[in-house]
Each structure stands twice: as structure tokens, then as C-alpha cells.
Image (cartoon, helix red, strand yellow):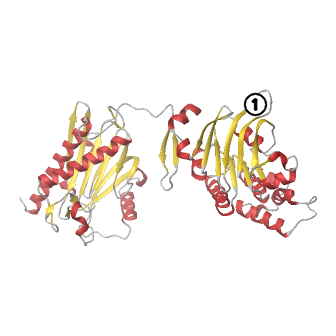
Amino acid sequence: MLTVEHITGGYDAAKPIVQDVSFTVKKGGILGILGPNGSGKSTLLKVISGILPSTNGQVLIAEQNIKTFSPKAFARKIAVLPQLHAHAFSHTVRETVTLGRYPHQNSWFSTWSEQDEEAVQKAMQQTGVDCYEHTNLEFLSGGEQQRTFVAQALAQQADILLLDEPTNHLDIAHQRQLLDMIRLEAVQNGLTVVSVFHDMNLASLYCDQLLLMEKGRVRAIGEPHEVLKEQQIFEVYNTRVSSYPHPELPKPQVTLMPSVSESHAPYVVTKEQFKIRDEFVELRTDFPLKAVSSAVHNAGFGWFQSFVNRAVDLNYMCEDAHEELKRYLEKHDFMPSNTVAMMTAVAVEHVVIREFSSSIGSIIVAVTAGVGNAVDVSRAHERVSAPYIGTINTWVIINGKLTDESFMQAMITATEAKTKAMHSEEIMDPISNTIATGTSTDSLLIASTQSGTFMEYAGPITDIGKLIGRGVFETTVIALQDYKRAKGWI
């Protein structure tokens, strides 16, 4: 365990850079240090490692003050990877890594052991530099040199590892490899790590705790979600960021918000931009729309310029519908990465597209509705049949600027309006013989131009919510009536 208590110090005792810094890292824990340039991150590591003097406070390893250790004993406890490495004469990769074993020698490599050799070989393999074992450092790239010095620190086999920007010069593949390896050493072998990062996202992913420094002092310390707060980052870095959850891990990620963004005149989508082709309905826009959907292709949040509702046969079956739909889009000159696509069993000529306006702006609603597989969601647990293709697909295109909260509320409002339309048209679940709420795999799209009127909320009693509720209800009713006529029900 590493404990730093009220450390103050730096290059000039009269003007210490690091002031009253305290933290504890448990055995096997990883602490990431963040902060703007000049905030004291690298200086803090140098004070902890004894490279620079402290004028106040103390550093403890397993509750023992580091000043009580001999130089070699200290080096067996703490390994340091500085930010920059100046080498006045050439060494091979192997020679550089073996220097990490010096704290374990009784004299200058006169007692080189099998354990020393194993440590060096393992460190080179872990960092992927074993293939350069006999290559001189000056012939390596900056990233390969960085990995070599990390290997040197690992070969030291210290209990604590201090790293100053370990991913500097590394591409994303080697960043992941290196940090995965360090994380594995911490989890499996109890390595305690303190590392300086410039990349907040990497720090969040791999660290248990983050320490945010500002002007030599601790601004915040805690778990990543406690430190990477938008307002706090803005106040420390004077830079706007947006925070969002990582797609696979319970860790926050941040995105830089530029001061100068791509600008254009307020953009409006109109009904006339929708095209009905032989097999699909499409919308292509001049500028990307921010969208959230439950589509087959590109579900979730994103920015897109193409939207497709593809009609397929009632008996459509495919082992990998996602891949098949991607190939279909490419065949019809859509860029899959820039397209949201749904599938429906309703022929495209039955799509209903309507435009609705109010004082706040306008929306376009497009619905395909076929309810031969209608389901009452409250009775769905009684079913044993396999689901069929979803046949009620709803698009709501909004000429306005929505928050993430209003996107979510817009989806709820649109779903409630669709369900009300099913009730109004008395669409029945054929198995439970009760009023249906939808079909087995309906899809919904909410897309916004993100220009024009700002719409913070989109619940049913807001102006935009009222427009969505009316638009989706009326459009779905017309689509359902069209389906009834096609089936001879009316």
C-alpha cells in the first residue's frame, strides 16, 4: 500500500509546485493522475519517488516512511517510468531492460540469476519488445522505445509502479495491450500503480481512482464517475466536454466540445424529401440528424444522413439479418455507417407520411403499420410462438434542437401515441383476444435536425410532446385503417 500524506515539494523549496497532496492506493489498486499542463502531475511523481525533495509531509510504503529505505531497498519497492528518457549512448533492448534488475544484484550483475533472466524475458514479452531484443534503441520508433522502458520498469519487479504518461507515442493497439497488461499485473499479482495520464478516457477505463490536480493541489479524488464531471473538467481545463457511459463498462468517457463547430443555416426537413422506392422508403438529408432508434441497423444514438424502411416478404428468414441488411444497403448505394435501417412486412406503397406544424416548429411522421401479428404486451408472457417480423415502424423527424432527455421522452410519447391508436382502432391480439399494444418487434426512430427551437423536454404536455402525440396518433390511425381495408376488415 502506498500512502502520501500532505506532501509539499518541488524544484524550489521557496516556491513548491506540489502543495498538500494526500492519497492512498491499496495493494493491487491503480490511481490515475489527471490535470492540465503545469498542474504538478509529473512533479508529484518525482517527489513521491524521491527524485525531488519534499518540504512537508511524508510518503509511506506499507506504513514505513520511504526515507528509512536504502537506495537499493527503495528500488525494490518502487519502479519509476519517467516521462522522457535521454540516453547518451546506445544500448540494445535487452541491455536496457536488464538495468531494471540492478536493485536485485549484490554487485554489478556478478550474481545474475535464473530469476533475473526470467524477469527480463517476461517483461520483454509482456510489452511486445522481445523481437527487438538485440536491436539498439536508436533504431526503434518512439513507441517501441517507450515499451522498452516500460519493460525495464516491469523487470524491476517492484511492489509499486510509478508511470508518467506510459502510453505516450503508442498507437491505440499498443495502448490497449500495455494497459491491459498493467491491469492484469495489478489484479493477479497485487502490483500497485500510480500513473499520470493526459487521456481522460484511458484513465477512466483502467484506473480504480482518479486524482485531478489544479495548480499543484488536489481538486478532486475518487472513482472515475466522481471526478470526470463536466462542470469540474470545465473549471479545471477551461474546456467544455460531454460525459457519457462506456458501452461495455461502468466507466464514464468524455468527448471534447469544440468552441468553433461546423455551422450552417437552420436546416429543415420536409415531407417532400421522403422517397418511396420499389422496396423501401428512404430519407436522405443534407446534414446529419441526431437520432435514437430501435432499428435493425445502427440502433441507439448517433448522427446519420440516410434513413431506410425496407419492406421484406412475410416469410423473410435470415441467420444474420444485420449482415444481410448491411449488404442490402451497400447494394442500393447507402453508406452503412451513415444509415439507420428498419425492416417491415408492409408494402412500401402503404407508408403514411404526414407533416405537422405549430408555433415551435414542425415534425414529419412516417408510419408503416401491419398488425397481423398484433400483441398485447401485458399478456405477451402467455405466448409460446416465435416472433415474426415487426410491422409497425414509426419515424418522427423533428425540426428543432433536443436534449438527450427530450429524445428519451419523445420515444415514450410516440410509443404512448401508437398504443392509443391501436386502442382507438380496436386492434386485437388474436391469441389473448384483448386490445393489442403493438406488434412483436416494432421499431421507432426519433431524429432531430438539432437546429432551430431548443426543446429541453418532450413529454406529452410540452409543446413538442403535443405535436408528437398528435402526429403519431393520427398517422398511425390512418396506417391502421389502410391495413384494415387491404385485409377486407372494413
Q: Residue furthest left?
A: 490
From what the image shows, is residue 293 above or below residue 243?
A: below
Where is mark 1, residue-wise? 16
The location of residue 96, given as percent across then percent down, is: 83, 56
The location of residue 438, given as percent across then percent down, is: 21, 58
On screen, residue 348 versus residue 125, left or right, reads left
The location of residue 118, given as percent across then percent down, is: 79, 67
On screen, residue 237 versus residue 10, left or right, reads left
Which of the 4 quarters of the picture holds residue 22? top right
State the residue at coordinates (25%, 72%).
385
From what the image shows, is residue 432 above or below residue 194?
A: below
From what the image shows, is residue 147 above or below residue 52?
A: below
Asked if one can make out residue 158 in the rendered structure from this viewpoint, the answer is yes
- Crowding at mark 1 (Cα within 10 Å: few <14, some 14-19, many 20+): some
Q: Looking at the image, how many numbered discs can be counted on the residues? A: 1
Q: Residue furthest top?
A: 14
State the residue at coordinates (7%, 61%).
489
Q: Considering the numbered disc 1 on the image, is that residue within a helix, a strand or a loop?
A: loop
On screen, residue 390 versus residue 233, left or right, reads left
Which of the 4 quarters of the picture holds residue 272? top left
State the residue at coordinates (29%, 50%).
282
- Name which residue type carries label 1: Pro
Q: Nearer the viewer, residue 119 or 372?
A: 119
